Amino acid sequence: MVAHDSGDEAAADAAPEPIRIVLADDHAVVRSGLRMLLDSEQGLEVVAEASDVDSAGRYVRGHHPHVLVLDLNMPGGSSLEAIPIIREESPDTQIVVLTMQQEPAFAREALGAGALGYVLKEAADEELVEAVRRAAVGESYLNPRLGARIASEPPPGPPDDLSEREVDVLRLIALGHTNAEIAEQLFLSVRTVETHRSHIQQKLRLSTRAELVGYALDRGLIAR
């Protein structure tokens, strides 16, 4: 009969639960590297990998992880639009966005939608583990260089009651992009772009693309 060391049992009982992570990125090579990075850290465990937005939401519902690491640009829908939906379906799952997008507008929108972390892929080796650990305990993380850019910018003041996202859509409309192209560039669904376009036209009381182009030129939203 093997005797058990009560001290070892107590230590095992006291061991904290690992931070369970769902990793979502549409590139298998990137996921493999990120998984190696996260799994090599004590107390972190990747429980599932997703390659598109739909499977990311499905794995979160199935595993209820502590943290979802979510790429912004994936097939299957808009990651930005999925953030509040996932947070509602799994309130205890925090979201860390991992992206190549360095524009402050994307960081503001992701954090505003409910993400707790925003990490640039170029800095993932140095920042992702810290962002995941912080998110797991309800703390936010923003790439320092991007945070400095946001802090140095004047507060956004979109004209004529347009939201910041509506200004983005208007600018791309005026530059001649289709709804599908705008959706791809802003990581939105085509239906959402159509809704933004309708709201823009209602707020500005403009009905044609030519009128929208003229408005954008007059307000300095695009160069003449």
Image (cartoon, rainbow, N blue to C red):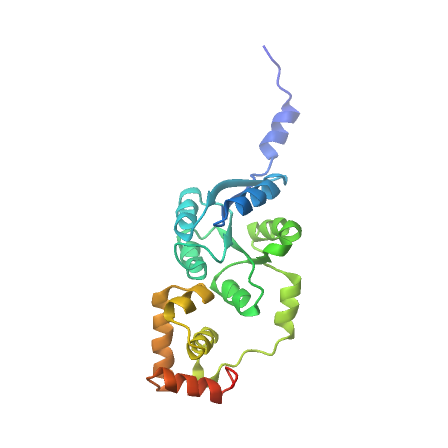
The percent coordinates of residue 194 (x first, y second) are 34, 71
In the image, is residue 130 above or below residue 189? above
Residue drawn at x 57%, y 45% is: 34
Q: In the figure, residue 150 lies in which quadrant?
A: bottom right
In the image, is residue 112 above or below residue 201? above
Pick whichever, 94 or 213, lies toward us: 213
Pick whichever, 22 or 20, lies toward us: 22
Question: Which residue lies most toward the top here?
Answer: 1
Pick whichever, 88 or 4, lies toward us: 88
Residue drawn at x 60%, y 35% is: 15
The percent coordinates of residue 107 (x first, y second) are 55, 65
The percent coordinates of residue 31 (x first, y second) are 53, 45
Count of marks placed on residues:
0
The percent coordinates of residue 43 (x first, y second) are 60, 40
In the image, is residue 224 above or below residue 22? below
Question: Which residue lies most toward the bottom here?
Answer: 218
Is 222 on the left or on the right of 130, as rendered?
Answer: left
Q: Quadrant of the N terminus?
A: top right
